[in-house]
Image (cartoon, rainbow, N blue to C red):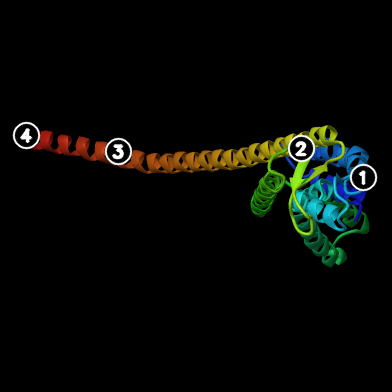
Amino acid sequence: MSWGTLYTQLVGVNRHSTSLGKIWLSVLFIFRVTILVVAAETVWGDEQSDFVCNTLQPGCENVCYDHFFPISHVRLWCLQLIFASTPALLVAMYVAYRNHKEKREILLRSDKKSRVKQEEDLESIRKRRLPIAGPLWWVYAISLVFRLLFEVAFIYALYTIYDGFWLPRLVRCDVSPCPNEVDCFVSRPTEKTVFTVFMAAASGACTVLNMAELAYLVTKAATQCLSMNARKSRANCAGKDKGVLPNKKNEILLASSSSVSSTCKAV
């Protein structure tokens, strides 16, 4: 699957996203996928061939390179982008399931409705935007949680594997089969450091956007629940007031009648 295919799938999800979700998708493809495809792959294209050690021992350079760079930055970023964007497809799968279910119901009722009305209903289902409520809210929130976990996990892995975001110019290696401690030189360390810091910052920005979107969904849902409970309590109070008013009227009538009867007795 190419990046274009992934973008096409995520654009379909973007129609049912919040404003923060749309910003997240723009940041993901403009500042991460585009930079990765256009520039980063070129910068890291010569990483192993230009990793030079001051030794002629066969296999020493390969072992030292594998020791200091167990996985390529570019491949790690590709995995991060795939894992971070895949949870959003859960929303697309749920929306497709809902649309398929409703389309099936419309087709089953085709004998009771005209053909034109049926086509209009199917077209409205294809173009509609589902509100983020009910089961869709849970699917969307779960996808955000997974996106957050993947982003944080890959940032931590990048920082742990390479001992930070800055690439050194010189590394000293004494791994077998090197005869002794040898000096190895990394190609384009400054340029690679710039790209590493930029990609880490873009990943951090996506993490912040995911956290903000999740907080927005939780706050909106809590506000709606509170307002619904307030409306229910007001409705219950209004019903109680309606029941109390006749009782008060009856009490007033009984009191007046008793006072009248006592007056009559006194007379």
Marks 3, 1: nearer the viewer: 1
Q: SS of the residue at dot 2?
A: loop
Q: Residue at x 11, y 37 (%)?
A: 262
Say which amino acid is labelled 3.
Answer: Lys
What whole-number distance in Å separates the C-alpha atoms at marks 4 and 2?
112 Å
What whole-number distance in Å separates the C-alpha atoms at marks 3 and 1?
91 Å
Q: SS of the residue at dot 4?
A: helix
Q: Which mark is residue 203?
A: none
Say which amino acid is labelled 4.
Answer: Ala
Q: Where's residue 155, x and y in %?
A: 70, 44
Contact, mark 3 vs mark 4 (Cβ under 8 Å): no
Contact, mark 1 vs mark 4 (Cβ under 8 Å): no
Marks 1, 2: nearer the viewer: 2
Q: SS of the residue at dot 1?
A: helix
Say which amino acid is labelled 2.
Answer: Pro
What whole-number distance in Å separates the C-alpha atoms at marks 1 and 2?
16 Å
Q: N-terminal of the two: label 3 or label 1?
A: 1
Crowd band around label 1 with a 10 angstrom C-alpha radius: few (<14), some (14–19), many (20+)? few
Marks 3, 4: nearer the viewer: 3
Q: Which residue is mark 1?
A: 46
Q: Where's residue 33, x and y in %?
A: 86, 42
Say which amino acid is labelled 1.
Answer: Asp
Contact, mark 3 vs mark 2 (Cβ under 8 Å): no
Residue 15 in view here = no
Q: N-terminal of the two: label 3 or label 2?
A: 2
User: Viewer-proximal residue, 224 or 265?
Assistant: 224
